[in-house]
Image: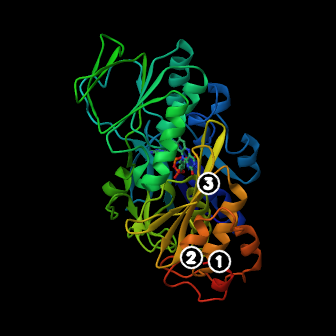
Amino acid sequence: MSQTHHVVIGGGIAGVSAAVAMRQAGFDGTVTVVDAEPPLPYERPPLSKAENAEAALRPIFPEDHYARHGIELILGTPVRRLDGVRRRVELTGGWELPADRVLLTTGVSARRLGTPGEELANIHTLRTAADARHIFAGLDRGGPLVVVGGGFIGLEAAAVARTAGIEVTVVEAGELPLLGPLGPAVAELVTRAHRERGVRVLTGRTVAEYAGPGAVREVVLSDGERLPAALVIVGVGVVPNDRLALAAGATCHGGIAVDEFGRTDHPLLWAAGDVASRVHPRTGVRERIEHWDVAMRHGAAVGASMAGRPTADDTLPFFWSDQYGKTLQMFGRGRPGDRVVLRRDATPDRFLAFWLREGRLAAVAGLDEARTVRAARTILDTGVPVAPEALADPSTDLRALARRLPRPATVPAGGTAAAGPRTTGVADWPA
Ligand SMILES: Cc1cc2nc3c(=O)[nH]c(=O)nc-3n(C[C@H](O)[C@H](O)[C@H](O)COP(=O)(O)OP(=O)(O)OC[C@H]3O[C@@H](n4cnc5c(N)ncnc54)[C@H](O)[C@@H]3O)c2cc1C
């Protein structure tokens, strides 16, 4: 067994996947995962989807999984500092760990806007198991609930509360919730789904102040409207936890900058998951992607690379969101300038949407359309040109078409469209 020590800072899905991948790639030194939070590493997606606090806390692996893979866990212990010269990881409480390689999978923290009254009781962000516990305790006491920010986490929490019969208002500063990731047509459908279930969705407004005393009683909006509130969930974006990397001298710009194998420009440091900023081979742009599937795959690839098996994660970005018992799935990422085509039979309860770039599929999203979304993903991977009219037509059988397409030899760097292999298939499309 080697004397080499790999320390993973952050026991989320990226960190845990990395630690396991190190072992699978044959690394036989010491692997230690350190996390600031006390619970056994857990999944974040259930925090905003589960019906109660118990169901929300779902461990990534059972405890004995770590022992079986020779992975040490140090939990409830934030890392304070990295000493690149002495190759030491300094933990809160005065301990130190020797480290030959350090992986930063520290994720992101919920953004706070500094709104007056933000420190009142019963105002929460939703990122950790502790946040979810507080929120479920608030939901158990009843509403009204005000959700500030119409992102995925806020809307999922709104759906959970509304399903439990609680009065919910969503306050969104933009023209529509989810306008950025989904574009106007799809965002409109998702907004309608909430409104039809009795959620009040206010757009183009911000919060001027939270009013108490002691605990929040009212949310005062920019136009003076006062919303009664017993509980507030603030979901207005995140900030990357890149403080340790910055202090150690690694380059960070909106996240810790890494290359295709997860290396930073500091010889000791690697990074993966939500905190890492990289040029994704499938989008061609430097960005941080905050999806569970991406964090899991990126963590595993970087873990293998650290263990001496260079691995680049080039999987098409994928995420899902559960609201009102329905699952939204999206492969790929839309960009300004894409043509968005909604299938003509779209309703707030079931829809398919396609993002076209230079005549080829760049992204697909569907609500309760898992199989067709998967078929569209195959079409996207092959890079065949697609006719927007065919995508809009509900009678087009995407699954049959996907079955007829040749498997892509390689996925081109720089995205799926212009550089995609020019294969046959366009003739199959009813124009
Ligand atoms: C409520 C919620 C719902 C979500 N739902 C979905 C979904 O439906 N679909 C989807 O695709 N994605 C979803 N996501 C996003 C997804 O969960 C994230 O992309 C994923 O968790 C990122 O994993 P990560 O390991 O990079 O970071 P994280 O999961 O954030 O883990 C980072 C860990 O690092 C620890 N840490 C930070 N600083 C330190 C330090 N100094 N010392 C020690 N430890 C430290 C933190 O405590 C944390 O445990 C959701 C996220 C949230 C919060």
Residue at the image point whose x is 57% and y is 47% from the top: 12
Residue 315 seen: no
Instruction: Tell me the mark number nearer the camera, choosing from 2 and 1.
Output: 1
* Picture quadrant where residue 312 is located: bottom right
Q: Is residue 430 above or below residue 224?
A: below
Q: Which residue is mark 3?
A: 345
- Image x and y of residue 321, in percent: 58, 46
**Residue 378 falls in which quadrant of the image?**
bottom right
The residue at the far top in this view is 213
Q: Position of residue 98 (x, y in %)?
A: 50, 55
Q: Amino acid at mark 1?
A: Pro
Tell which circle, 3 or 1, labels the residue nearer the N-terminal end.
Answer: 3
* Alpha carbons under labels 3 and 1: distance apart: 17 Å
Nearest to the observer: residue 220 or residue 16: 220
Q: Earlier in the sequence, mark 2 or mark 3?
A: 3
Q: From the viewer's perspective, is residue 1 above or below residue 425?
A: above
Q: Of 384 and 299, which appears nearest the observer?
A: 384
The circle on residue 387 is 2
Q: Amino acid at mark 3?
A: Asp
- Quick check: is the Cβ at mark 3 less than 8 Å away from ligand 1? no
Where is mark 1, residue-wise?
430
Kindly identify the residue that appears in the image at 35 percent across and 50 percent down: 243
Q: Secondary structure at mark 3?
A: loop
- Amino acid bearing label 2: Ala
Mark 2 and mark 1 residues within 8 Å of each other at the beta carbon: yes
Asked if the residues shown at circle 3 and circle 1 are in contact, with their CB atoms under 8 angstroms apart, the answer is no
| Ligand 1 has an atom within 8 Å of the beta carbon of the residue at disc 1 | no
